[in-house]
Image (cartoon, rainbow, N blue to C red):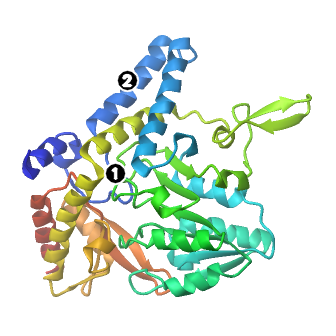
Amino acid sequence: MSYDQELELIRKDFPIVKKRIYMNNGSFAPIPLSTIKAITGFLLKYSEEGPDSTSVQEYITTLIKEVQYRVSHLINCDQEEIVFTQSTTEGLNIVSSGIGWNKSDLIVVRGGPDEHFANYFPWLRVSEKFGVGLNELKIDSTGFFDIGELEKFAKNENTKLITLSHALYNNGAIMPVSEVGKIARENNVLFCIDAAQSVGSIKVDVKEIGCDFMAFPGFKWICGPVGIGILYCSKKSSEVLTPQSVGSDSAILTNQRNIAFVEFPHNFQAGFRNYVGLAGLESSLRYILRIGINNIRKMNMKIASELNGSLEAMEDISLNAPQDENLRTSIVSFGAESLDAGTIVSKLDNYSITVAERAVSQREKKKAVRASPHFFNSQSEVETFISSLKTILK
């Protein structure tokens, strides 16, 4: 099957392409029709057979195992290392609040406030609450940091954890996570990754990376429903975390007054009930795994390269991402001299084109237009995008 034929079939699964050019998958991705049907099917079964019926409970048990199986294939982990959450933010908070912190501990975070706030605020809170030191890696104009500086921080005997985004939310720059993982292991330092902008977009292998924790949502590049996310936690590293929530699903009562947590990962899922979200996530995982992450990466970069090339040819436009395609996702970040990013985003919306405004630098208060195309976007959409942008900038 040719690229054009495959793309035509894929676009039929996403109703939004009939009405809009949607390039905001870095925020929320639309879900395919098969996922909508899976969600509807779950709700129908749930309602027709009874929420607490034996058949529905057996179905939920099977569903949980199916999601664990597909996630394990997606990121190359064991099924028992998967914790269900509602978002990347919740996953990162499970880690930051679950570690026993001492005042002498140090945390290393890429870029400080230029890291996504979901992966900055939890560690900033730990610093404020426990007096833990926060070492912020200096970054260049595209978000990369000096490995030498990170290694120097890692060698400090008080450094307890390194954290960073796998791919940056504002320009798609892919961080050298495998190299960081090696440094973390050599220095016996925990390594936590915000993978919101990578899983579903590029190949992610937690065993190759060597991270202890990785959080990501189902509703971005995986094209799943909102309100469902995943926290990967290695079996070994789960031992350093203490659950901050407790309920009948995550603990048992011993000696009438003592609580004992059940085994990992169930001890971190107190009161989890988003089964309809799991039904949607399982369907979306099946969808992207069927296409294949390597194929998705090729399709994404084909569109991103065409968009980058067209923008680069425009005199008024400046690009913010790394030039090397191997160092970025399909996120395209740009600014214009004649018009601010927010106005461009608003005016493109009038042309039924959805993109986002994102900060390039919190310190410099600099913002850019972020387009985040996915595998269902087409070359003709890029042409319309550029034509509309040129009209706006006249």
> Can residue 241 be seen?
no
Q: Which residue is mark 1?
A: 29
Depicted 221 relative to depicted 305: above or below: above
Instruction: Work out which quarter of the rendered image holds the C terminus and state it.
Output: bottom left
The quadrant in which the N terminus is found is top left
Above or below residue 9? Residue 164 is below
Judged from the image, the secondary structure of the residue bearing numbered disc 2 is helix
Residue 100 pos. (x, y %): 77, 61
Residue type for callout 1? Ala
Q: In the shown orientation, is residue 226 left or right of residue 53? A: left
Q: Position of residue 82 (x, y in %)?
A: 55, 44
Residue that mark 2 sits on: 41
Name the outermost residue toward the front.
Answer: 186
Image coordinates of residue 382 in percent, x first then y, are 14, 64
State the residue at coordinates (52%, 19%): 58
On residue 202, which mark appears?
none
